[in-house]
Image (spheres, rainbow, N blue to C red):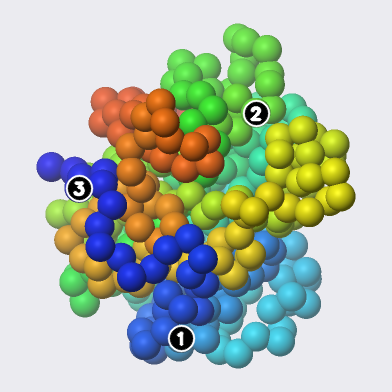
Amino acid sequence: MVSPQAPIDSPFGMRSTAKEVVAGIDLSGKTIIVTGGYSGLGTETVRALAGAGAHVIVGARRPDAAEEVLAEMDGTITILPLDLSDPASIDAFGESVAAMVDTLDMLINNAAIMASPLMRDARGYEMQFATNHLGHFQLTARLWPLLVAAAKAIGRARVVTLSSVGHRLNGLDVDDPNFENREYEKWPAYGQAKSANALFALELDKIGKPHGVRAFAVHPGGIVTPLQRHLTMEEQKAMGWFDEDGNTHESFKSVEEGAATSVWCAVSPLLEGMGGVYCEDCNVGAMADENTPRGSGVSPHIRDEDLAQRLWVKSEELTGVSFPA
């Protein structure tokens, strides 16, 4: 039985910050991985978790840049190379982590690309799907024994995967996820990748629940970060993200606010016994209907358990990776 996709009584909301969410929670002795933890939301996620006492391992495609960004932060932070579009890099990262720690309490699959022009990895896979979903699928599989070991030791471990309200743009074509038989469009590709992130959390939670490993998907909200690097200002104005004077829409969050829901899903005691849900604004998201604003809400296709299982099988096929029994 999957957890209900319905809001709960949370003391936090849209304008809560990552620091507020983790206040009073002692993460001493915990090990947490954050992919892309040196840019945008990842930076504030790392700051909050390391500040609460956790040992945070940051997977970075550009380790030198990560060193520069994270050098001033308090806490214990380790930076390891990780390119989510390169299977060999993912395996090497997993091996490095396993040589460093015996257990992993939380994995935050944060790194992403958005609305990029058509690019393909060395396998020929479309880059948004390959990086945002397949890379994190393989990474989670490689780290799975450490997550299970943490859950066995203390009764719980969590995997938080960043999705997006972009999942509402369109669904997921499991038969052609790499745009081999249809014309590539950057926004449908992003919507598909973010749908895959949410469906991954849904299926992962079913697999992890018997072991004490729970999974969550997150919509962080609208935030100005380097994620928009592939978009022109004219495009962003046309979508209403900025006005003609360059001011962001009132619904946008600060980076500190944007990181809050990821941190909430990782640490909140309110989510004990739950999993597989899509969260936003430091709460479990509500199902969308015809009156739901486009910037929030949950579309039914990311709650489709059959689709989630089909995506899982396809992901194993495309990566050649299966989760340990």
Give how far apart the Cα atoms at labels 3 and 2 are: 30 Å
Neighbor class of circle 3 (other Cα within 10 Å; few <14, some 14-19, many 20+) is few
- Horizontal side of 202 relative to 183 (left or right) equals left
Specify the amino acid type for callout 1: Ala
Q: Residue at x 67, y 62 (%)?
A: 40
The residue where tag 2 is placed is: 187
The residue where tag 1 is placed is: 52
Q: Residue at x 78, y 77 (%)?
A: 68
Residue 301 in view (yes/no): yes
- Element type at marker 2? helix
Residue 249, image x, y percentages: 68, 50
The residue where tag 3 is placed is: 3
Give how far apart the Cα atoms at labels 2 and 1 are: 37 Å
Residue 225, image x, y percentages: 71, 56
Q: Residue at x 78, y 54 (%)?
A: 247
Residue 275, image x, y percentages: 26, 53
Specify the amino acid type for callout 3: Ser
**Viewer-closest of 52 and 131:** 52
Earlier-in-chain disc, 3 versus 2: 3
**Depicted 151 relative to depicted 170: above or below:** below
Give how far apart the Cα atoms at labels 3 and 1 are: 28 Å
